[in-house]
Image (cartoon, helix red, strand yellow):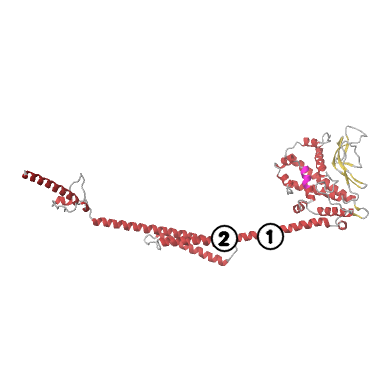
Amino acid sequence: MESSQGAVKSSNITEIVHKFARVCRLRSIGVFSEENHFPGIEPPTYEHSSSEATETDDYDGQKVYPQPPEEKEKEKEKEKENEKENTQKTEALETLISKLFANISALKAAYVQLQAAHTPYDAEKIQNADRLVISELKNISELKHSYRDKEKPFQDSGQDAHLLAEIQEQQSMLKTYEVMVKKFQAQIQSKDSELEKLRLELKEAFEKKDNLEKKLRQKSFRDFFESSDEDIYDPSSRLTPQYFISMVQAAAKAAHDFTKVMINMMKSAEWDLDAAANSIEPGVRYAKRAHKKYAFESYVCQRIFGGFENENFFVSDSIPAILDPEKQRQEFMAQFKDIKSSDPSDLLAISPDCVFGKFCRTKYLQIVHPKMEESFFMNLDQRDHVQNGGHPRTAFYQSFLKLAKSVWLVHRLAFCFEPRVNIFQVRKDTDFSEVYMDSIVKNVELGDGAVGLRPKVGFTVMPGFRIGKTIVQCQVYLTGMKSID
């Protein structure tokens, strides 16, 4: 029994030794590291044949070849050198780009300085700025050559050079901004000077306006009569009716001219002139179709002379009552003389809200109906401008101002007479009177073969005036007449 038990123990020990031997052999070929062997047990050593010296035993169907440690170290060193070289090249390229940006900014700053030196012109500043531009162009050229020279490494590469280039770029930009700020400051000073000049001109314009208004009220009636270029003084009657008649004739011509302009614009707007004339003066028999133009002229005169009996045509407050009638006549004569010697557009530009300006504004809105103006100009912009206190310089409004001025002169001169001049017109179907009336159509005879019948008034075209015992005939259109010319 003892011998059999000893044999069993000996067999178990032999298996254990073989297992450890296999484990140690696996460690020797690199499957386990040296730190994984069992403590206190030294791995056994084996002798191998020549074929086993270069190739280890199979393990799980794979062969493992050992690599010499020297080659691994060389490869790692080479990789580190390549990585370092790539890093240096990247830093050098970034430095080059930073320098390029810095030089471009410096070139921009130099060019801005060159421009600023021309306004105002400064020869010394221009030369300095020109040298800066050339210097920066040379720096850019040097960068180009250093980039093309592959064998020569970039100088001043690295983080410090990169930061230095960025600082230079910011400094160049700062110089550019300083030049631009100076330029803007110069422009602001120029605008301030121009604004101050305009303020002075505006102040002078207001002073001229005040002087003109003062002049309208201070010129004396006697100075007007003593003027050599105004032939209106008659020692016996102070004012001659003949001069007043000349003013009335000028107003009649101005009304005719403005009516002609208005009719032409109505034709351009494709108005039915026959219907328009019949609406103004219905039931009138015209000797010729062309005579219907007198209906439009009557329309203009009726509205422009409306309110003639009032001191200001009822467009503003009346002149304050003056106890001395002579001083009141002096006031009207002073206004007459100043308006006559002035261009209405210039006068209204200086004082658009004077009494004459209000008269022009009111009469224009009465004569030119909104529908009429819209058909003329396709809008109401001019009407809105007049309603807001303006006086446009359009051709149509300028022709109206000529009419307004002539009527205003007749009105101011009428109030200079003592007694004052009276205005009149005749009603429709009134018998024609050669004393008070004048036919606007000349060379006419009775129609329908009627003999001994006095022609009838169709309508008044231009009103008449009475200056004491002197009569200025009104112009009328007669019905029942036919032209013989």
Query: Quadrant of residue 442 in the image?
Result: top right
The one nearer the camera, 9 or 189, is: 9
| Left or right: residue 2 compared with residue 442 | left
Residue at x 33%, y 57% (from the top left corner): 82
Image point (76%, 58%), residue name: 208
* Residue 365 on the magenta span: yes
Quadrant including the N terminus: top left
* Residue 425 seen: yes
| Location of residue 32 in the rendering, given as x and y in whole percent from the top left corner | 21, 50
Decide if residue 304 is on the left or right side of residue 59.
Answer: right
Q: Disc 2 marks which residue?
A: 181
**For the stretch drawn in magenta, what is the main secondary structure?**
helix
Tell me which amino acid carries mark 2. Val
The reply, left or right, for residue 407 in relation to residue 26 is right
Nearer to us in this view, 478 or 24 = 24
Quick one: SS at disc 1?
helix
Q: Work out whether 210 lies above or below 478.
A: below
Residue sticking out furthest to the bottom: 124
Amino acid marked by disc 1: Lys
What span is colored magenta in the figure?
360-367
Q: Residue at x 19, y 53 (%)?
A: 39
Q: In which quarter of the image is the C terminus?
A: top right
Label 1: few (<14), some or many (≥20) within 10 Å?
Answer: few
Residue under label 1: 197
